[in-house]
Image (tube, helix red, strand yellow):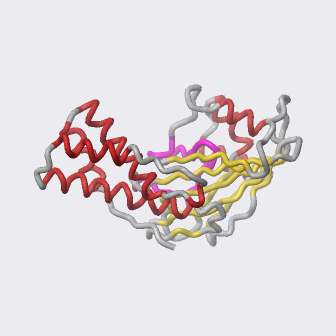
């Protein structure tokens, strides 16, 4: 599950009209054994070639000046990432962009020891990873967001955290991404458990659908760091069950819940 947030820091950012090459700096990783390399690092170009290969879409290449290479030199696999870009426009206005990527529902896509990923503001890529290998195409490269980066005067990146296969979250957690990633690991599992329990207890289908509709309608908002992420993830998952019911019927909806419960259950902790 990928989540992207754009947060104003000092008022509303006003972006320049003329694209330029921003000054981009990646802060060294504060996570032991996890290495961050930006475009200014000498090994960056070789790492891009090694991870993505020489044949890439034009849309992928357009985002690479704002990407970092994250290498896992620990003894555990990594199942989630949280990164933060701070963009400064020519007038000094600042905007913060937070991107999280969780692989809890695709554990085979974990980034193992010695492996690396290309961490972009809109996606994480790794050509040899079955869950992260899709190139950026014309339908999803987000030109408005790209212009935001191209028009910035200065950009700073920080790796805010990772979740290892043990479930442990490690990192500075500046924007409290831990709360979101913990909810991603537990709330969906709990909703799937509750849905199957209602079915097995003989709850009438109209009552189950009404319960899912009420849950999906919650949609809690608020600032990223103080949002009720358990409720937010539960709301999103309830909506996905309703979509499955509408497209395929009752059995398809329950099959999705059973698939969720068949995955290894991981609870994120500090």
Residue at point 40%, 67% (across, down): 267
Report if residue 42 is visible in the image.
Answer: no
- Front-most of 187 and 169? 187
In this picture, is 225 found above or below 30?
Answer: above
Q: Is residue 263 left or right of residue 112?
A: left
Q: Which contiguous range is marked in magenta?
A: 108-133
- Front-most of 113 and 85? 85
Asked if residue 264 is among those painted magenta in the image, a careful observer would answer: no
Q: Position of residue 99 (x, y in %)?
A: 60, 50
Q: Main secondary structure of the magenta part?
A: loop
Q: Position of residue 88 (x, y in %)?
A: 82, 47
In this picture, is 20 found above or below 153?
Answer: above
Residue at point 43%, 52% (across, down): 233
Q: Is residue 179 left or right of residue 218?
A: right
Residue at point 61%, 59% (across, down): 71
Report if residue 91 is visible in the image.
Answer: yes
């Amino acid at each position: 599950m990928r989540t992207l947030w754009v947060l104003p820091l000092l008022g509303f950012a006003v972006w320049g009209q003329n694209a330029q090459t921003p000054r981009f700096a990646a802060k060294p990783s504060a996570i032991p054994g996890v290495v961050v390399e930006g475009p200014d690092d000498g090994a960056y170009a070789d790492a891009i070639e090694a991870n993505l290969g020489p044949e890439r879409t034009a849309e992928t290449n357009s985002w690479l000046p704002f990407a970092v290479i994250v290498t896992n030199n620990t003894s555990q696999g990594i199942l989630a990432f949280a990164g933060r870009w701070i963009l400064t426009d020519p007038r000094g206005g600042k905007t913060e962009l937070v991107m999280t990527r969780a692989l809890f529902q695709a554990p085979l896509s974990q980034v193992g020891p010695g492996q690396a990923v290309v961490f972009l503001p809109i996606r994480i890529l790794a050509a040899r990873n079955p869950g992260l290998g899709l190139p950026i195409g014309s339908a999803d490269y987000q030109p408005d967001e790209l212009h935001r980066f191209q028009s910035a005067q200065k950009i700073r990146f920080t790796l805010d955290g990772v979740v290892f296969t043990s479930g442990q979250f490690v990192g500075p957690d500046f924007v409290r991404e831990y709360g979101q990633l913990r909810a991603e690991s537990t709330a969906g599992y709990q909703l799937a458990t509750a849905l199957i329990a209602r079915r097995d207890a003989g709850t009438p289908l109209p009552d189950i659908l009404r319960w899912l509709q009420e849950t999906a309608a919650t949609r809690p908002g608020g600032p990223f760091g103080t949002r009720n992420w358990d409720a937010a993830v539960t709301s999103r998952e309830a909506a996905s069950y309703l979509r499955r019911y509408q497209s395929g019927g009752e059995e398809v909806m329950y099959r999705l819940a059973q698939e969720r419960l068949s995955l290894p259950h991981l609870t994120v902790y500090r």
